[in-house]
Amino acid sequence: MTLRVDALVRRADFVLRVELTVESGQRLAIVGPNGAGKTTLLKCIAGLLPVNEGSISLDGGVLDDADTDQFVPPERRDVSVVFQDYLLFEHLSVLENVAFGPRARGARRSEARERARELVATVGLSDLSERRARALSGGQRQRVALIRALATRPRLLLLDEPLAAIDSSARGELRSTLERQVEGFDGTTLLVSHDPADVEALADRVIVLSAGNVVWDGPVSESGWRIR
Amino acid sequence: MNRRHPDRPPRAARWLAAVTVVFFCLPFVGLLWKTPWSRLLDVVTDESGRRALWLSMRTSVLAALLSVVFGVPLAWVLATSRFRGRNLIRALCLISMVLPPVVGGISLLFSLGRTGLIGRWLDDWFGFRFTFSSWGVVVAQVFVAMPFLVLTVEGALRQADTRLAEAARTLGATPWYAFRRVTIPSISGALIAGTVLAWARAFGEFGATITFAGNYPGTTRTLSIETYVALESDPGRSMALSVLMVGISFVVLVTLRDRWLGAERSS
């Protein structure tokens, strides 16, 4: 599941220029100041924003290619996202949120709910599975967002500041849950974070983005001050 | 002296508001005062009244449903797409809302009527005429009522968080699926309000209907036409019919408001 990005994206206030290969199973952290283009990069990979030049491919299959005008829509990319503010479907229950992906991909209702029930149990939310998303606490929302993203068995998991909205007191425990889930996930992971502790727990490799360019690329062990 | 709430409107505004309330209530007081109450049951049980009531119910509910089926996609396109002439198209689709209904009826007559642009072919090829047909009533009602739904739903779709639909897409939802399961539930209050408005407008429709579809008992004589016709021959009957219409509209608006719009506000 090798991800290749060689693309240029023009936004109102900056130009993102990225050339990047992420090997199958690798866990990559993307760090850098606000406005460096981290979220833009995730959106392009997820298919929520087309690139202006160049291409993105996964396992050799083109996802987006500006030159040949190919564009795979997000629903056919097998790329899941945990959004910074989670974007849970507030009118649905925990179980329905998690079952949403499998259902959208054509699984039968009972099948999708079974899959959702297993995942809900792995993050200790079984007691809340019938509760509406709007009635959950921040930490519970985070866990639902995570398993909702994993429920479709994606090839690529994108985590956009997954713990930024969490109180610092609860962050440590949620980080362990997240680490366990990412550990058990057999695809490739991309993490955007400002928190060095997240990067150390959830990534093997780091790239530093600044003003739309990759300015450093290397293993977590050598990243040192760059992620602080 | 009571302690004043800081955002209480000034005295002059409250007086003007009170005058407005009186203005809206007075006609109903007059109607209720003059109505021969003993005849209220007659108008819903006699042949002519029953047929008109049943016709109005059928056609207005169908018109509201058709407004949803065609109006929601239109609202979706108008709210999310940018193309040249979008504002012109919106104006054309909503103009019937501010047009005198009789003008709408005349326009329909010369397009879909028996001698109209398209109506002539419908007649020649299929022997189908909207004139004196209940379908004509439905078309007239949809023509004047759908804009209320489109306007309400388009406004809500502009306010809706498009990122929720994006999240649904990354989970494997097609645009239709995301719209149906995520966007629509997030604007359900506005959709219901728009549907009720469209239904109420269709239920009360008079001018376009009588101009386009005619006034034929059983097929095109709706409750509002029946009421108008009765005014000349039997004013008491017309008042009883009016009270009936006020009652139906009032009950629908109040129950749906409490059930849906109230719930939305509190969440």
Image: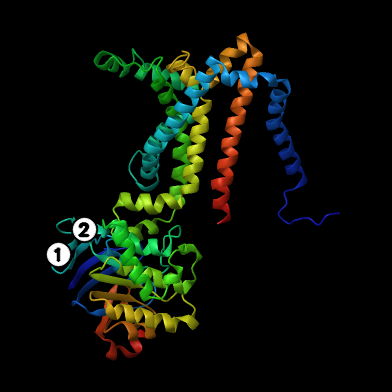
The answer to whether mark 1 and mark 2 are in CB contact below 8 A is yes
Mark 2 neighbour density, 10 Å: few (under 14) some (14–19) many (20 or more): some
Q: Does A120 appear above or below B209?
A: below
Q: Is residue A79 above or below residue B205?
A: below
How far, Cα to Cα, is label 1 from label 2?
10 Å
| N-term mark: 1 or 2 | 1
Give the labeled residue for mark 1.
A61
Please name the amino acid that badge 2 sits on. Val
Q: Amino acid at mark 1?
A: Gly
Q: Residue at x 72, y 49 (%)?
A: B9
Foreground of the two, A56 or A145: A145
Q: Disc number at residue B114?
A: none
Looking at the rendered structure, the secondary structure element under dot 2 is loop
Residue at 46% x, 40% y: name it: B151
Closest to the observer, B49 or A44: B49
User: Which residue is under mark 2?
Assistant: A72
Q: Position of residue A150 (x, y in %)?
A: 30, 69
Q: Position of residue B125 (x, y in %)?
A: 24, 16
Q: Nearer the viewer, residue A99 or A83?
A: A99
Q: Quadrant of the N terminus of chain A?
A: bottom left
